[in-house]
C-alpha cells in the first residue's frame, strides 16, 4: 500500500459537506477515497476501484483475497484486511476548526487505523463485536480478539472495564469479558499483521500492470483530487538532491563521521568496500539475527501544500549473513515507522538490503573479520535498488551498514567528552551504524540508526529458574526540538528466569534515567516492556532477545528502543552480557 497522501478540497466543498451532514442527508456525501484496492472488495454491493468515492454510511466488505485502503478527507487512513466487514457509521469534519467525529463498526476481520486530524483533536471510535476502541492521535491494529497501539494511545472498553494502551502495548479480547491488562504483543504479532495488510503475490493495489504511464498517473491524480492538473503529492519526477542526514553534535557523534561529509551516505559505502580481510582474526560464516532502531526523516518535493519535514522513530529486525569464502556480507533491515501528529508523509514499513551473498550480483560489501564488516546499498543486475518502502520499489538509494567496535565507540565517546558509558564487551553479539537516503515518487526518505545482532539461541536453552544481571549500553539517534544528535547511556537488566521478568535501568542517556520492567513473551527468548524516564515526560519502549555468548546459550542480549517525550523522539539499540 502507498503511504498516506493528502487531498486538496476547497473550503466551499467542505462547507457544503458539513451542511449536508447537519441536514441529515449525508448518505450520498463523499467522505474519502479508495487509495488502494486488491480484489475483491465491495461497498454497498458495488465493486470498489482505486480512486472510488467512499460515502457516509458505507458498508465495505472484502473476501479472503481482498483488501482496501481508505483515505478520509481529514487524512485518516484505514486499511481493511481480508475477509472483513466495516461500516462507516458517522463522519463529521470541520477543516477550519480541525475537529470532527469518526465512528465505524468492524463486524468481522481486521483493520489498521492511522489517525488523521480527527484522532488528534476530536473523536475517533471503532466498535467491534468484542469491544469499543477509542483512538487518540496514533496508529492501531484492531481485530475481533485484539487491539494493538502502535503509536499514540487507545482506550479499549469491554465487559464493563476499560484499559488504556500506550505506544507498543497490546490487549486481548474475549466476547463480553474485560480486556486483558496492557502488555507486549505476542511474538511476531506485528509482523504478521503487516503482512496481512500488504498486497500479496500478484496483487498491485488496484493498478493495472504497465498502467503507470505519466498520462495514466495524471488522470488518476485528477480523479483523486477532483481538479484538472491536480497532484496528490507534488511533482512526479523530482530532480533535486535528497536532504542531508541531520548533523550529529553530541557524545559518540563521530560514530557516523563517514556519513557526514559532502557526499553523505556515499562515504559510508566507500568505507564498507574498503574493509580488508585480516588473516589474523577469525571470519566465521554464519547468520546473525537481531534488531534495529533509528529516526526516519521524510520530505515531499514540489508539494503544493509546502509540507514540513516529518520525523518518526523506526524499529524492526536485522538479519546479517557473513560469507567468509566469498568475502561477502548481506544485511536485511526491516521494520515499521511510528506515526504521530504532522507525520502524514512518513512511510509505514521499510525493507532495506545492504550487500549481497548472491554470487551473481555485485557484492557491495566486505568482510574483514568478525569485528569489522560492512555493506553498501544493494542493487540488482540492472542497477535498481533491492530495497523497498511500503512494499514498493524505490527509485534510487545510497547508504551503508557498518560495525562499531567497543574500542572505537569508547574512543569516539571520549573524544566528545563522555567517559561514563559502559559499552558491551560482548563475545558474539555485534552492533553498528546504518544510514540510507532514497527516493520514491515525490518522497525523499533518509534514516540514521543503529543495529544489533547476535547468535540465536533456542527456546529450550533459556533457563527456567535463577537470576542473572546483564550490563552494557544503549545508543540512540535523538531529535530534541529541532536538534538531532546521537546519545549513549548505560544499560542493566536483572532477569528473574523463574518469574519470566526483568528489572531494567538505563542511566545517563541524554541526561535522562529510565526504569521499568520487561516481561518474557510466549517464546522465552524474547522480552518487551516500557520504561519511565525522569525528565521531559519521556518513555522508552524496549524489545529484545537473548543471544549466545561464551558463558552460555543465553548469556548475551540485544534489542531496540523507541523513545517519546515532549517534543522529543529517539530510536536506537541496546547490547549487554552477563556480568
Image (cartoon, rainbow, N blue to C red):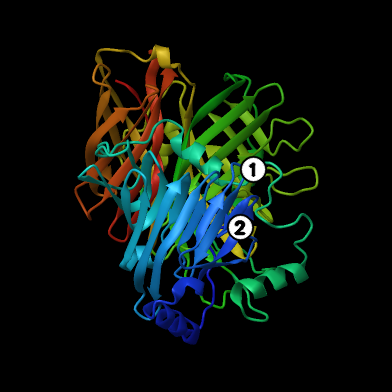
Residue 50: x and y in percent read 64, 62
CA neighbours of label 2 inside 10 A, class few (<14), some (14 to 19), many (20+): many
- Residue 390 shows up from this direction: no
Taking 334 as reference, is 115 left or right?
A: left
Residue at the location (59% across, 56% down)? 42
Give the quadrant of residue 402.
Answer: top right
Q: Which residue is mark 2?
A: 36
Q: Secondary structure at mark 2?
A: strand
Dot label at residue 103: none
Q: Is residue 386 above or below residue 288?
A: below
Residue 187: x and y in percent read 42, 30
Residue 294: x and y in percent read 45, 47
Q: Is residue 362 above or below residue 430?
A: below
**How many numbered markers are drawn?**
2
Of the image marks 2 and 1, the number of the one nearer the N terminus = 2
Instruction: Name the foreground residue: 268 vs 36.
Output: 36
Taking 29 as reference, is 19 left or right?
A: left
Residue 91: x and y in percent read 40, 68
Q: Which residue is mark 1?
A: 200
Q: CA distance from mark 2 to mark 1?
A: 13 Å
Taking 407 as reference, is 224 left or right?
A: right
Residue at the location (46% across, 65% down)? 57
- Tell me whether the residue at label 2 lies in contact with that at label 1, contact meaning CB atoms closer than 8 angstroms: no
- Residue 562 shows up from this direction: yes
Residue placed furthest toward the bottom: 12
Taking 497 as reference, is 310 left or right?
A: right
Q: Secondary structure at mark 1?
A: loop
Give the quadrant of residue 372.
Answer: top right
Assign the C terminus to one quadrant of the image: top left
Residue at the location (37% across, 36% down)? 185
CA neighbours of label 1 inside 10 A, class few (<14), some (14 to 19), many (20+): some
Amino acid at each position: 500500500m502507498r503511504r498516506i497522501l493528502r487531498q486538496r478540497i476547497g473550503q466551499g466543498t467542505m462547507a457544503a459537506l458539513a451542511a449536508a451532514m447537519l441536514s441529515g442527508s449525508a448518505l450520498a456525501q463523499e467522505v474519502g477515497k479508495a487509495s488502494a484496492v486488491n480484489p475483491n472488495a465491495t461497498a454497498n454491493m458495488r465493486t470498489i476501484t482505486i480512486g472510488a468515492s467512499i460515502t457516509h454510511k458505507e458498508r465495505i466488505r472484502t473476501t479472503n483475497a481482498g483488501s482496501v485502503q481508505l483515505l478520509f478527507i481529514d487524512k485518516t487512513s484505514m486499511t481493511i484486511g481480508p475477509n472483513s466487514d466495516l461500516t462507516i457509521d458517522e463522519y463529521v469534519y470541520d477543516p477550519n476548526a480541525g475537529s470532527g467525529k469518526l465512528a465505524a463498526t468492524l463486524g468481522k476481520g481486521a483493520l489498521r487505523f492511522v489517525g488523521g486530524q480527527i484522532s488528534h483533536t476530536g473523536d475517533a471510535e471503532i466498535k467491534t463485536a468484542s469491544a469499543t476502541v477509542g483512538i487518540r492521535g496514533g496508529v492501531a491494529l484492531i481485530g475481533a480478539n485484539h487491539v494493538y497501539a502502535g503509536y499514540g494511545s487507545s482506550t479499549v472498553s469491554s465487559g464493563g472495564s476499560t484499559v488504556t494502551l500506550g505506544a507498543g502495548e497490546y490487549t486481548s479480547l474475549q466476547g463480553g469479558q474485560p480486556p486483558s491488562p496492557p502488555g507486549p504483543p505476542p511474538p511476531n504479532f506485528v509482523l504478521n499483521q503487516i503482512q496481512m495488510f500488504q498486497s500479496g503475490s500478484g496483487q498491485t493495489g488496484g493498478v493495472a500492470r504497465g498502467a503507470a504511464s505519466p498520462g495514466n498517473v495524471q488522470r488518476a491524480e485528477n480523479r483523486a483530487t477532483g481538479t484538472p492538473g491536480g497532484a496528490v503529492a507534488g511533482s512526479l519526477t523530482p530532480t533535486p538532491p535528497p536532504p542531508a542526514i541531520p548533523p550529529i553534535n553530541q557524545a559518540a557523534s563521530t560514530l557516523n563521521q563517514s556519513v557526514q561529509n559532502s557526499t553523505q551516505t556515499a562515504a559510508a559505502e566507500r568505507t564498507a568496500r574498503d574493509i580488508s580481510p585480516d588473516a589474523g582474526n577469525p571470519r566465521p560464516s554464519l547468520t546473525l539475527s537481531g534488531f534495529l532502531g533509528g529516526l526516519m526523516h521524510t520530505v515531499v518535493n514540489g508539494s503544493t501544500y509546502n509540507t514540513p519535514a516529518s520525523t518518526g522513530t523506526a524499529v524492526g529486525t536485522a538479519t546479517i549473513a557473513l560469507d567468509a569464502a566469498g568475502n561477502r556480507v548481506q544485511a536485511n533491515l526491516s521494520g515499521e515507522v511510528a506515526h504521530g501528529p504532522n507525520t502524514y508523509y512518513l512511510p509505514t514499513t521499510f525493507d532495506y538490503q545492504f550487500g549481497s551473498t548472491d554470487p551473481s550480483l555485485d557484492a557491495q560489501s566486505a568482510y574483514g573479520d568478525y569485528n569489522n564488516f560492512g555493506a553498501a546499498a544493494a542493487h540488482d543486475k540492472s542497477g535498481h535498488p533491492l530495497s523497498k518502502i511500503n512494499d514498493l520499489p524505490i527509485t534510487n538509494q545510497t547508504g551503508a551498514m557498518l560495525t562499531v567496535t567497543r574500542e572505537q565507540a569508547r574512543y569516539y565517546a571520549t573524544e566528545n567528552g563522555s567517559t561514563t558509558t559502559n559499552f558491551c564487551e560482548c563475545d558474539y553479539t555485534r552492533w553498528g551504524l546504518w544510514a540510507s537516503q532514497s527516493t520514491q515518487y515525490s518522497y525523499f526518505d533518509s534514516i540514521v540508526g543503529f543495529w544489533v545482532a547476535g547468535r540465536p539461541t533456542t527456546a529450550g536453552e533459556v533457563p527456567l529458574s535463577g537470576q542473572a544481571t546483564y550490563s552494557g549500553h544503549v545508543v540512540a539517534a535523538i531529535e530534541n526540538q529541532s536538534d538531532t544528535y546521537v546519545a549513549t547511556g548505560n544499560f542493566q537488566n536483572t532477569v528473574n528466569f523463574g518469574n519470566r521478568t526483568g528489572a531494567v535501568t538505563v542511566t545517563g542517556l541524554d541526561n535522562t534515567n529510565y526504569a521499568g520492567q520487561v516481561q518474557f513473551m510466549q517464546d522465552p527468548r524474547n522480552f518487551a516492556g516500557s520504561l519511565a524516564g525522569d525528565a521531559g515526560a519521556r518513555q522508552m519502549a524496549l524489545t529484545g532477545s537473548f543471544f549466545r555468548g561464551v558463558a552460555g546459550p543465553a548469556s548475551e542480549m540485544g534489542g531496540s528502543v523507541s523513545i517519546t517525550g515532549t517534543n522529543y523522539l529517539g530510536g536506537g539499540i541496546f547490547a549487554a552480557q552477563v556480568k
